[in-house]
Image (cartoon, helix red, strand yellow):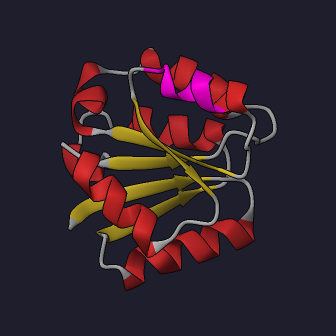
Amino acid sequence: MLDLVMLVDDNDTDNFISKRIIELAEFAERVEVKRSGKSALEYLAEHANNPANIPSLIFLDINMPIVNGFVFLYEYEQLSSVIHEKCQIAVLSSSDTKRDIDRMLDNKFVIKFITKPLSEESLAELQKKII
């Protein structure tokens, strides 16, 4: 079981469902929900010196206003290496555009692309990829 995961998605319904699946599957002890890429980046920067509050895994949506998944990843690369060493990213998106999927998977911080909705099966597959 992971200590902390973060959901980054502007859709409250998707966040509710994903959080519930994570809890039911006992995938993580804590789930931090951020409704925008900007607030997620602010959280990570604010907690960079507190490893207990850095998530082991971030579930990142692509399609969000202002700071979408691609912008988030660009900004994430500028964050402290302490964060990069502890945190991995799984894209959780309804996008089925091959270009989006390939572009996300080409990012060195992304370990998996999951199509919404999150399921216990996708969490089990993800568990195998987590370092």
**Residue at the extreme right:** 65
Above-or-below relation of 111 to 27? above
Residue 105 highlighted magenta (yes or no): yes
Look at the magenta stretch and give its main secondary structure.
helix
Does 102 appear in magenta?
A: yes
Q: Quadrant of the C terminus?
A: top left
Q: Position of residue 90 (x, y in %)?
A: 46, 44
Extent of the magenta region: 101-107
Residue lying at 40% horizontally and 79% vertically, measured from the top left:
23
Looking at the image, residue 48 sits to the left or right of residue 101; the answer is: left
Quarter of the picture holding the N terminus = bottom left
Residue lying furthest bottom in this view?
Answer: 24
Q: Decide which of 21, 113 is in the foreground and name it.
A: 113
- Specify whether 70 is left or right of 40: right
Q: Is residue 40 left or right of residue 56?
A: right
Q: Which residue is at a point 73% across and 54% down the rendered structure image?
A: 10
Figure quadrant of residue 28: bottom left
Tell me where residue 58 appears, x and y as whole percent.
44, 47
Residue 30: image quadrant is bottom left
Rendered view: 114 above or below 71: below
- Residue 7 lies, in percent from the top left, at 52, 56
In which quarter of the view is residue 116 placed? bottom right
Query: In the displayed structure, does residue 109 sit left or right of residue 73?
Result: left
Residue 63 is situated, as x and y percent measured from the top left of the image, at: 76, 41
In the image, what residue occupies the spot 32% across and 65% down? 124
Q: Is residue 72 visible?
A: no
| Image: 21 above or below 67 | below
| Residue drawn at the location 22% of the way across and 29% of the way down | 85
Looking at the image, which is closer to me, 78 or 21?
Answer: 21
- Asked if one can make out residue 61 in the rendered structure from this viewpoint, the answer is yes
Q: Residue furthest front?
A: 98
